[in-house]
Amino acid sequence: MPLPRKRFTSILYPNASIFAVFVLLLFSSWAKIPSHIPLHDLTESLAFKKAVGLHSLRLDGAVVNYQSTAGYVNVEDSQHRKAQIFYTDYLVRRANRPVTFVFNGGPGSSSIWLHMGSFGPVRAVPGKNGYQNNPNTWLGFTDLVFIDPVGTGFSRASNSADEKCFYGYQEDVEIIGQFIKKYLTDNNRQNSPLFLAGESYGAARAVGLTAYIRTAFKIPVKGLTLISPALNYKLVTFRKRNDAPYPYYLPTYAATAQYHNQLTPELQQITPEQLSKKVTAFAFGTYRNALTGLNVLPANVIDTLSYFTGIDTGTLRRLNGRVTDVQFSRLILKKKGEVTGTYDSRATGKASAVADPSEVALRAVFPQAFQQYQQNELHYKTPLAYLATIATPNWNYGPAKAAGGYLDVVPVLRKLLSGDTDLKVHIVSGDYDLATPSSTVNLYANQIRSHSVSVHRYLSGHMLYTDSQANAKWYEDTKGFYQMAL
């Protein structure tokens, strides 16, 4: 599952200049990685044999024939630590087809969510058992390679003692970059237009990968799809003495309150777009100025916060006008004895429940659907358990931990775009996302200021593809993005 809330406790990089120096040093060392990797080939064992299949599906009125492969690529990092990365690919045998490498976030998430939720030839639907044909599969315009990072899915370190050595931003980008290079070489796809798609933390991974494989291997990336991206963790990390997130979350709080009919009749009657415009003006004007200059927020600010969130002024005074995502999800429907979801704030559940209500249906459906699909369609056999998500509490976001900073890859993305006019970026987000609110995307686009960046928002949550209507609209927008990028 992408970007769990409790993993915002050790985020790094205090400013763009330090991060830029880090990236420069990091990439200079990455460029020295050996090209030949003498690994023990697990495919000699029957349990690790690749499964290759031929399939067909109907897309836009035409039959598309494609090949699937499920298996491993053996890789090694610059410290000679070895891993077997599991992947599933789908290839249509046509000339000049782009290839898109896909991964979720976390960190600690497999690619099952994007694989079975949106991109792949079949789709699991929350609330329904099994899977069904996917009319909105990206296979219509790109070949697909779904990657499970080390420790997730079926991917493992060769030596179990090394598993946690891959749990860091630098280490993660490096080992997946090695996978991409080897996959392209093994499958003779070096000249194919290359795209990356990453969700949440996976978006930050995609930016780092673009810089890494360009520097280390001279491999250019044609396009990036950044889904509900976490690019600057200062904006999505609730921590003492960090007031940066609150203005960015306020428009999503208001949208959620309106959806659940918790606002005044005046605000309930206007459109979500009109509400967003009103709230955004306050959030990045009066509210942000008050957060910056005052320890105790004045009464007029508290009153306006109550007006836009539906939370009573007494509670807001007690919190000094600073409401975290978790607090909001528990406060907004408190009188009903309910909480909202974080991944999709339209979802509700009992206040006594431990799990995020927007996660429950997904966790009940996706792993089981993938297991059925793996056995019945991919015919992949393995003794390993598929780990959809894993805990990574000590993830190493970089060398600035002692400084108490935050991971911020926006400067890296800006530099990539300024140095490569062929690179295109598509950023998408959901209006009901309490993990990475869509207002942060507006900031990223403004900071980058490039005609190569397109932005789309949907009436959905963090995993926007779990909403079928939003997923269908995103599919059409993505087809347009690929046509433009190519």
Image (cartoon, rainbow, N blue to C red):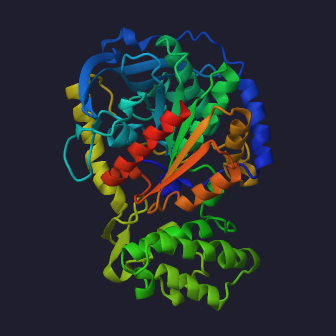
Residue 467 visible somewhere in the drawing: no
- The structure residue drawn at horizontal position 27% and vertical position 51%, both measured from the top left corner, is 126
- Residue lying at 53% horizontally and 59% vertically, measured from the top left: 438
Q: Is residue 149 visible?
A: yes
Q: Position of residue 428 (x, y in %)?
A: 50, 50
Residue occupying the point 63% across, 12% down: 35
Residue 99's place in the image compared with 341, above or below, is above
Q: Is residue 318 above or below residue 351?
A: below
* 78 over 245 or under it: above or below: above
Q: Please state the horizontal and vertical placement of residue 7, each as a whole percent of the image.
A: 53, 53
- In-image side of 390 versus 220 (left or right): left
Q: Quadrant of residue 476?
A: top left
The answer to which image quadrant residue 319 occupies is bottom right
Q: Quadrant of residue 478?
A: top left
Residue lying at 28% horizontally and 39% vertically, measured from the top left: 135
**Residue sitting nearer the eye, 76 or 365:** 365
Tally of numbered tags: 0
Q: Position of residue 433 (x, y in %)?
A: 46, 60
Q: Please give left or right for residue 310 compared with residue 286 in the image.
A: left
Q: Is residue 84 left or right of residue 485?
A: left
Please determine whether, in this image, residue 222 is positioned above or below residue 12.
Answer: above
